Image: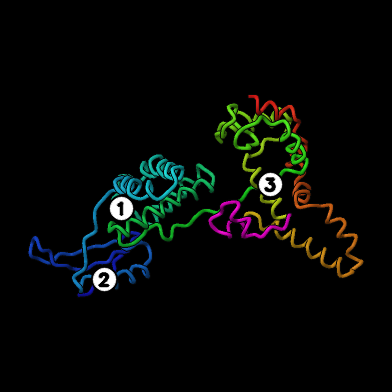
Amino acid sequence: MTGSIHKKGKVYYIVFRIFDSESGKRKLKWIPAGNSKRAAERHMNDLMGDVHNGTFRELKKATFSQFADLWLESYAKLKTKPSTFRSYHDIIHKHLIPVMGDYLLTEITTGKLQRYVALRLAKVKPKTVINEIVPIKELFKHAVRWGYLRVNPAEYLERPRSHRKEIDILTLKLANEMRHWKTICPKNDHGLVFPSPEGKMSIHENVVKRYFNPALKSAGLRRVSFHSLRHTNASLRIEAGQNIKYIQNQLGHASIQTTLDRYGHLIREVNTEQVRRFENVLGYAEHSDSFSDSKNKSVRRMLEDSDKNETEGLVIPLPVRHLEAIANA
């Protein structure tokens, strides 16, 4: 028995006849195989092997909405962090189901998913769309594994480009203020820098909304992301010469590539300074002046100078009275 490939619209189908045990007759089967003829041909070879071996099975039927709820409860809820699960749940129920909830899984093609991406890009930032593509790819991958699809329509779904924002990095003026703050910080059992009014662990949302943002405003500083503190930590580690693998572990990045993508430019600057240091040791007098300059111009200073208007607010020392206001709020 052989099959053939036919195209309807933008979708390729594998067409073949199979014996129907209920009617006792052979019937024609149309199996959607995606938007690529080459992929459809590869899939047909596998499918025909199953037909000849008697291992061919009909796909389970479900709408996108039905399968999405099954996937959330049977996989995402068990295998992801609570915060990740909530994010997946919101993406699926607020955005995906309203668009394609009534479609059968077999009716959803790569083209339909790519159009969804284009529609979302017209409304939200690329980073938001990239975050939404993550559960889409995972959901359809499991639809294939669980026998609802033979071809994954999200496999070749293209992510939009995302332009990374410049990272805000604070200066060692801040470090001096923090040392002073440590001497007058309210005592607590955990050695926390900014405990809650009760001396316990603070809730992130409360810290940002109630204390961090008001403190920036009160001190006359430009409003920056709370995440800037994390970036500052990473930049200081890099400038101190810590191993990039160690920095990855400290930041909790799943892949060292993530660390390199975000902080690679800082590493390159530090490496340049190390070369100048080495040349100076070897006695290259012509580099002594430039080395002196580079020594005074740290990674943080380099970043500040590159966009002075954006970061000049960050070099203002944070008055102690504002730190006290945070603790006593």
Percent x, y of residue 261: 61, 57
Q: CA distance from mark 2 to mark 1?
A: 22 Å
3D distance between C-alphas at marks 1 and 3? 45 Å
Mark 2 or mark 1, which has the lower sequence index? 2
Mark 2 vs mark 3: which is more N-terminal? 2
Residue 148 pos. (x, y %): 28, 56
Q: Which stretch did the figure color magenta?
A: 240-261
Q: Is residue 238 magenta?
A: no
The outermost residue toward the right is: 285
Q: Say which residue label 3 marks.
A: 232
Query: Which amino acid does the dot numbered 1 rest on?
Result: Leu
151 sits left or right of 207 in the view: left
Residue that carries the numbered disc 2 in the rendered image? 4
Q: Is residue 192 above or below residue 25?
A: above
Going by the numbered disc 3, the residue's amino acid type is Thr
| Mark 3 secondary-structure assignment | helix
Question: What residue do we see at 60% from left, 56% from top?
Answer: 248
In the image, 122 versus 218, the foreground residue is 218
Residue at 60% in and 34% down: 189
Q: Position of residue 168 (x, y in %)?
A: 68, 44
Q: Identify the disc placed on residue 105.
A: 1
Q: Residues within 10 Å of mark 3 (few under 14, many from 20)?
A: some
Between the C-alphas of marks 2 and 3, the distance is 60 Å
Label 1: how many Cα within 10 Å (few below 14, some 14–19, many 20+): many
Quarter the C terminus occupies: top right
